[in-house]
Image (cartoon, rainbow, N blue to C red):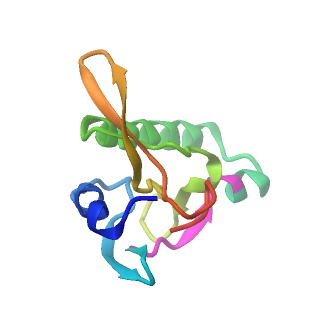
């Protein structure tokens, strides 16, 4: 496990994310040697819950697919790879006029391992000390 002192640049990377379909980091702090991350509150249900309640229409599915790809393209362009992409980490925000998809739980880089994709380098992300998919 990395020490809180070494987490600073990783938290800075998450704090620099600013995209309408990616959850925003509000604050972070250390307590008992562990890093805690505070993100914005998203009113809505996870994509998993949304689909369990009944499949959305094709128009909604298309809109959500486009929004998810926009979010992933953005974080990938920043050198970040979401290592736990699943319906439970995607929230459909109902407070907006037309419901909007928000990608949550990007996590902190576990280590500086790099994935090579074309000419870009990406850092694998996961929050240490948590199980995968655990809300931040």
Comparing 30 with 19, the one in front is 30
56 relative to 44, above or below: above
Residue 100 is at least partly visible in this image? no
Whether residue 56 is situated above or below residue 6 in the rendered picture: above
State the residue at coordinates (73%, 46%): 55
Residue 3 seen anywhere in this rendered image of the structure: yes
Residue closer to the observer: 78 or 45: 78
Task: Find out whether residue 43 is within the magenta segment.
Answer: yes
The reply, left or right, for residue 54 in relation to residue 36 is: right
Residue segment shown in magenta:
39-48
In this rendering, would 110 be left or right of 11?
right
Q: Which residue lies furthest to the top in this view?
A: 118
- Measured from the top left, where is residue 49 in percent x and y? 71, 59
Residue 26 % position (x, y): 31, 75
Q: Residue at x 46, y 42 (%)?
A: 68
Q: In which quarter of the image is residue 114?
A: top left
In the image, residue 97 lies at what x, y percent?
42, 64
Give the mark count: 0
Can you give x and y, in whole percent of width and height, for residue 66 in the image?
A: 44, 36
Q: Is residue 3 above or below residue 119?
A: below
For the residue pair 17 and 10, the one nearer the viewer reads as 10
Left or right: 60 in relation to 81? right
Position of 29 with respect to 46 (left or right) is left
Residue shown at 48% from the left, 41% from the top: 63
């Amino acid at each position: 496990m990395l020490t809180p002192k070494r987490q600073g640049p990783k938290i800075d990377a998450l704090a620099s994310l600013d995209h309408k379909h990616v959850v925003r980091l509000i604050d972070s702090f250390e307590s008992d040697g562990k890093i805690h991350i505070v993100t914005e509150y998203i009113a809505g249900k996870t994509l998993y819950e949304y689909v369990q309640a009944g499949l959305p229409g094709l128009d909604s599915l298309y809109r959500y697919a486009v929004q998810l790809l926009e979010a992933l393209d953005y974080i990938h362009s920043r050198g970040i790879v979401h290592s736990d992409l699943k319906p439970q980490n995607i929230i459909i925000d109902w407070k907006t006029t037309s419901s909007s998809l928000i990608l949550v739980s990007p996590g902190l880089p576990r280590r500086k391992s790099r994935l090579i994709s074309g000419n870009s380098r990406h850092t694998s992300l996961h929050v240490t000390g948590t199980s995968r998919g655990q809300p931040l």
